[in-house]
Image (cartoon, rainbow, N blue to C red):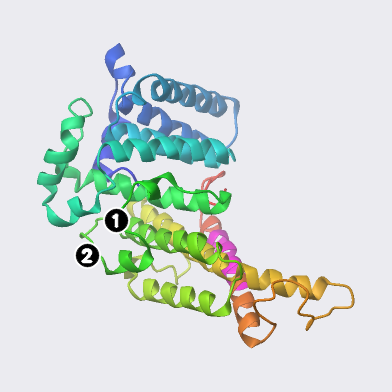
Amino acid sequence: MDPFSNDEFDAIIRWYPTDQTEKASARFANQNMILAIGAQCAPVSGAQAQIERECLASAQSIASSILLESPSLQGIQTFLLLAFYMLGACRRNAAFMYLGVAARAAHALGLHNAKLYESLPASSVEQQYVLPFLARSKVTCANQFPSERIWKSLVTLEFVVTSILGREPASLLTHPGHANFDQMMHTRQRNTPDPALQASYQLSWLINDVMSNFYQRETVTIEAAQLYMEKIDIWLENLDESLSLNDKPSVVEPEAWAQVIGSLHVSCFYHFAVTLICRPFLIQQLRRRLAPGNPVNDSTVGNPSFEDGPEVADLAEKCVTAARYMAETCAEVLQAGLFKESMPLLK
């Protein structure tokens, strides 16, 4: 998730409200949520906990009393930050609710209509379809499609959360333009200043396909799993070289630090997708091995749609390998000093 451009983020952090009107704005709510998430990641202390509570309460008050009645890009950013905070606090149901509000607000502004981004120049899209709703939100089209960045952040975060909770994403119900991962990979994409967000957005559609089709079948087949693994290979072939985490990360400057964290998000997203696809085959093998008498070839145990064999063993091994690589990658970044004390990445 990356709902802010670097310039927009710096402007929010340096901004100071001068009157009560500004203190009731979405911009002030976003500033408070940025501080709350920062405090959430910081070492636990009395002062940190107080800042976290006060900033969260202020943002929640603005979101519930003002932003629900007037959809805006900055308001959607607020609900995304609230959802991210709730995930870090292990409050997944609250995060799910905030993401639902953000999805409806995005639909109200027309952000779900992908054809707008594909057919019109940035200035035309923002001026004709978004900016009329945002006269007071101080969002311009200079940030290279802020609406597209926000929409991709929303879809990416919501698809992950709903795949974990086993629920339907609200953003999918309002997105007629891209029905699945295959269409996403063949749809012309604008040049994005954030390759990590673009890669995560594309992979989120594969995860949604897995949840909507693969897990909704009465039986899980080896052929379907292998097909999804082939799709992941296609995604990998199109991955930006700047997202590679092959080398062990080291302490770097802030700009490079942000790139490492973005690459780590993509890496964890990839391993999560592989785990999601291959998990049924690992469970099947474990159930057989843990059954009384170890009846490995007993077709009455587990899913009857496939039998143990080299292909099942390969998929099960990929599931374990993906989980191990994700843990090892996070450990390396932590040892390099690039993680805060309570980084809510995996929560």
Labelled disc at residue 188: 2
Q: Is residue 177 above or below residue 88?
A: below
Packing grade of label 1 (10 A; few <14, some 14-19, many >=20) is few
Q: Please state which amino acid type lies under the numbered disc 1.
A: Asp
* Residue furthest out toward the bottom: 310
Location of residue 63 in the rendering, given as x and y in whole percent from the top left corner: 40, 25
Q: Is residue 274 above or below residue 18?
A: below
Location of residue 236 in the rendering, given as x and y in whole percent from the top left corner: 39, 73
Q: Is residue 131 visible?
A: yes
* Residue furthest out toward the right: 293
In this picture, residue 129 sits left or right of residue 222? left
Q: Is residue 132 above or below residue 240?
A: above
Residue at the image position 48 percent from the left and 53 percent from the top: 160
Location of residue 122 in the rendering, given as x and y in whole percent from the top left corner: 14, 49
| SS label for mark 1 | loop
| SS label for mark 2 | loop
The mark nearer the N terminus, 2 or 1, is 2
Of circles 2 and 1, the one toward us is 2
Query: CA gap, disc 2 to disc 1?
Result: 16 Å
Choose top left, top right, bottom left or bottom right for residue 286. bottom right
- Nearest the eye: 341 or 202: 202
> Dot 1 corresponds to which residue?
194
- Nearest the eye: 289 or 146: 289
Q: Which residues are magenta?
A: 320-332
Q: Is residue 85 visible?
A: no
Residue at the image position 69 percent from the left and 69 percent from the top: 283
